[in-house]
Amino acid sequence: MKTFVTACLLAAGILGQVSSATAEPLPNVLLLMGDDHGWEETGYNGHPHVKTPVLDEMAATGFRFDRFYAGHPSCSPTRASFMTGRHPNRMGTFTPGWSIRPEEFTIAQLMHRASFPTAHFGKWHLGAVKAESPVNPGKMGFDEWLSHDNFFELNPSFSRNGGPPEVFQGESSEILIRETMSFIDRQQAQGKPFFAVVWFGSPHEPYSGLPADLALYDDLPAKYPDKMVKLTSNETGQQTQRPLGEVLRERYAEITAMDRAIGTLRRHLAEHGLKENTLLFYCGDNGTSADASLACPFRGVKGQVYEGGVLVPGLIEWPARIPQPRSTMARASTSDLLPTLQAITGQPLPDRPLDGRNLLPILDGTLAARPEPMGFWEFDTKHLDKSQPYIDPELQRGTTPLVKKSGGLSTRNFTNFRHPKISPEDYRGPRSFIDGDRKLVIHESKGGQQKVELFDLKKDPGETKDLAADEPKQVETLQEKLRAWQDSVLHSLTGADYTP
């Protein structure tokens, strides 16, 4: 296993970068992520309505990934990839509400080893945030946290360091950034670098907004009066139907408020002399949800392995390393964050497979295209044996309330199961595999028949023309590579990576 992982690190450009990367002072690191914020929902990507002046400025003055991918088309799995550099199926984080596993190694643990104080603010969704949970932010490497089990709206409830939920009055993105700035100030006063993960609750439905933000989009209800969409009612917590224009007005108000909060953070860094050597990153956790998909040039929405389900905004500011604005079409993902931070800090990694790569060569302009394939896979959980919980279910019970009810509950519980043996059914589920510009997509029908598609993402980024019948050898090659990658992922799922 060690030989395999070392080979992976060499291929990713991690080993050999440590000495040069750590010769300069280590940067402060702030990793921000929106909730259900798809690629197209920014001004800089040409959206016809949504206003994101801060993200637009970051795109114009920093580093812009034009093809940045969430690790999965839904939230909990993407967050697992963000934290670990590994595909979420490796740790049984299959869908929203499936927790991470305690043995996973996270970016917070890596940064803690490098002597960074660490903090998490906002949505966690990788297990319960209460003190007794074995997968709360503290157990996964954060020194402090103000977090929610799931998502939240105006006047949210958060648990501070695992304590009982507290209500915080105000707009949620503003609250999180205020807490983040307080954390930064405390570390700066002690002369320490800082590492924080900020996961916003916006713009996930149900939607709400401040009056001034809503007013920016008062014209939308009249523009989209007829189409009805399904989403959660803020009044009942149950499913309802509302006109698309009203929904978009509220959703875009949330995005604009989140954008403004990021601007507040950027100003704080500048005013305190921290901007130059702070790595500030922003992305979304999956594509736009179906209730709000409006102007996406890509096929698919949240929950689908087509491009529209996994492409998200991806931005970095780090003036000390990226002094001039740049952009890239090289593909990158949330799984790349951990190996990139490893390259920056020079800290050791655990002896287990990673799915991400070090992005420093892309940031420095020495690499124009991703040399490794990227895999996406929605595990089919219907056949799973759920007789062996990985974590005591009592420890997986959430405490922080939210508007959207599930099974009559206004909180969220989590699950994960032991999976010691692999069966043929474990390879099923919607999946895609990108190698160069070719993308293989496989779905199974209810009858078990496979639908196999092949797309050229360079010529056809909207995935409109299926080339599978025209390029059977390419399909066969990609299927073999996909299967080999699935073999590795499923080996991890059995828990084999955690044994000495």
Image: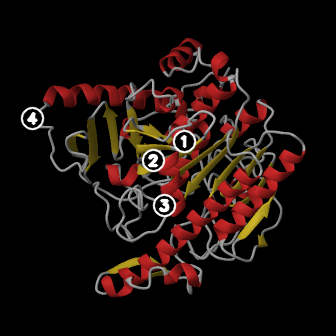
Q: Secondary structure at mark 4?
A: loop
| Residue labelled with disc 4 | 470
247 sits left or right of 27 in the view: left
Q: CA distance from mark 4 to mark 1?
A: 34 Å
Instruction: State the SS at label 1.
Output: helix
The crowding category of the residue bearing disc 4, from other C-alpha atoms within 10 Å (few below 14, some 14 to 19, many at least 20), is few
What residue appears at the point 42 percent right and 25 percent down from the top-left corner?
Answer: 367
Q: Look at the picture and state if 344 lies above or below 108.
A: above
Most foreground residue, 482 or 212: 212
Q: Is residue 86 visible?
A: no
Q: What residue is shown with label 3? A: 36
Tell me whether the residue at label 3 lies in contact with that at label 4, contact meaning CB atoms closer than 8 angstroms.
Answer: no
SS for tag 3?
loop
State which quarter of the image contains the N terminus.
Answer: top right
Q: Which residue is mark 1?
A: 81
- Name the foreground residue: 479 vs 119: 119
Residue 293 disc label = none
Say what amino acid the circle numbered 4 marks: Asp
Label 1 crowd (10 A; few <14 / some 14-19 / many >=20): many
Mark 2 vs mark 1, CA separation in Å: 8 Å
**Observer able to see residue 26:** yes
Of marks 3 and 4, which one's residue comes earlier in the chain?
A: 3
Give how far apart the Cα atoms at labels 2 and 4 are: 28 Å
Measured as percent of width and height from the top left, residue 125 is found at 62, 56
**Residue located farthest toward the right when viewing the structure as drawn:** 190
How many angstroms separate mark 1 from mark 3 (CA)? 16 Å
The colouring scheme, among rainbow, by chain, secondary structure or one colour, is secondary structure
Q: CA distance from mark 3 to mark 2?
A: 12 Å
